Image (cartoon, helix red, strand yellow):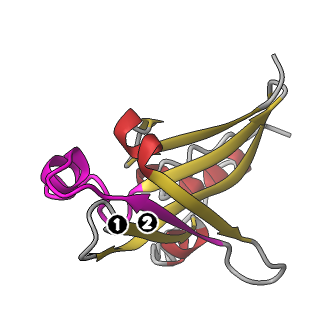
């Protein structure tokens, strides 16, 4: 198998492939990664008037802030994750021309949500190191980040 494929996965705690209607509506994807700064993304989707995105997905909260998005490129069978982040906001740009309305999803990598969870002050005394590390990392489970701690 050769070529390049885009993989878009979306969800809250668990995630799966984005619906076909979402993937087909993608006009552009921009991923920004700078050393020492938060990474981010912006996805522009074409939005048909009365289409499934406008009629069902937006009202149901499908693109709600906090939802996780994983963007990957599969090149010759090798997957490379471009962005594993969360939607920060979405904007709808209407147009007078048919078929030109746009839904823009803007987000950041997972570190922004991770910074908002504060569990400082939890006592860790009397626990083995691996249990301490697992307890510290458990706070990220609701974000869909599953820690894998390897014992020493």
Q: Which mark is residue 41?
A: none
Q: Residue at x 52, y 68 (%)?
A: 123
82 and 29: which one is in front? 29
Q: Which label sits in the foreground, 1 or 2?
A: 1
Magenta part of the protein: which range? 40-67
Give the class, few, some or many, for how many residues have Cα within 10 Å of label 2's Cα (few <14, many ≥20): many
Question: Position of 120 compared to 67: left or right?
Answer: right
Q: Which x, y percent locates residue 145? A: 55, 49
- In primary-sequence order, the first of circles 1 and 2 is 2
Vertical relation: 112 (above or below) 141:
below
Image quadrant assignment for residue 110: bottom right
At 19% from the left edge and 56% from the top edge, which residue is drawn? 54
- Is 137 covered by the magenta stretch? no
Depth check, front residue: 27 or 18: 27
Residue 93: quarter of image: bottom left
Name the residue at the front extreme.
Answer: 97
On-image quarter of the N terminus:
top right
Query: SS of the residue at dot 2?
Result: strand
Query: Where is residue 57 drawn, in percent x and y?
Result: 22, 50
Name the residue located 86 percent from the left edge and 40 percent from the top edge: 152
For disc 2, the marked residue is 87
Asked if the magenta segment contains residue 60, the reply would be yes
- The structure residue drawn at horizontal position 28% and vertical position 71%, both measured from the top left corner, is 97
Residue 26, horizontal then vertical, whole percent: 48, 52
Residue that extends furthest to the top in the rendered view of this protein? 1
Q: Is residue 115 left or right of residue 72?
A: left
Q: Which residue is mark 1?
A: 100
| Structural distance between the alpha carbons of marks 1 and 2 | 22 Å
- Mark 1 and mark 2 residues within 8 Å of each other at the beta carbon: no
Q: Nearer the viewer, residue 5 or 13?
A: 5
Left of 117 or right of it: where is 93?
left
């Amino acid at each position: 198998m050769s070529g390049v494929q885009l993989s878009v996965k979306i969800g809250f705690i668990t995630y799966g492939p984005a619906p076909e209607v979402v993937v087909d509506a993608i006009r552009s994807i921009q991923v920004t990664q700078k050393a020492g700064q938060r990474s981010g993304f912006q996805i522009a989707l074409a939005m048909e008037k009365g289409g499934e995105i406008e009629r069902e997905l937006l009202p149901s909260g499908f693109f709600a802030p906090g939802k996780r998005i994983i963007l990957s490129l599969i090149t010759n069978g090798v997957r490379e994750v471009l962005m594993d982040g969360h939607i920060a906001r979405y904007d709808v740009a209407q147009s007078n021309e048919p078929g030109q309305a746009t839904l823009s999803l803007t987000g950041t990598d997972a570190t922004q949500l991770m910074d908002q969870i504060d569990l400082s002050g939890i006592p860790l005394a009397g626990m083995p190191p691996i249990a301490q590390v697992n307890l510290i990392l458990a706070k990220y489970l609701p974000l869909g980040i599953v820690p894998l701690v390897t014992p020493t």
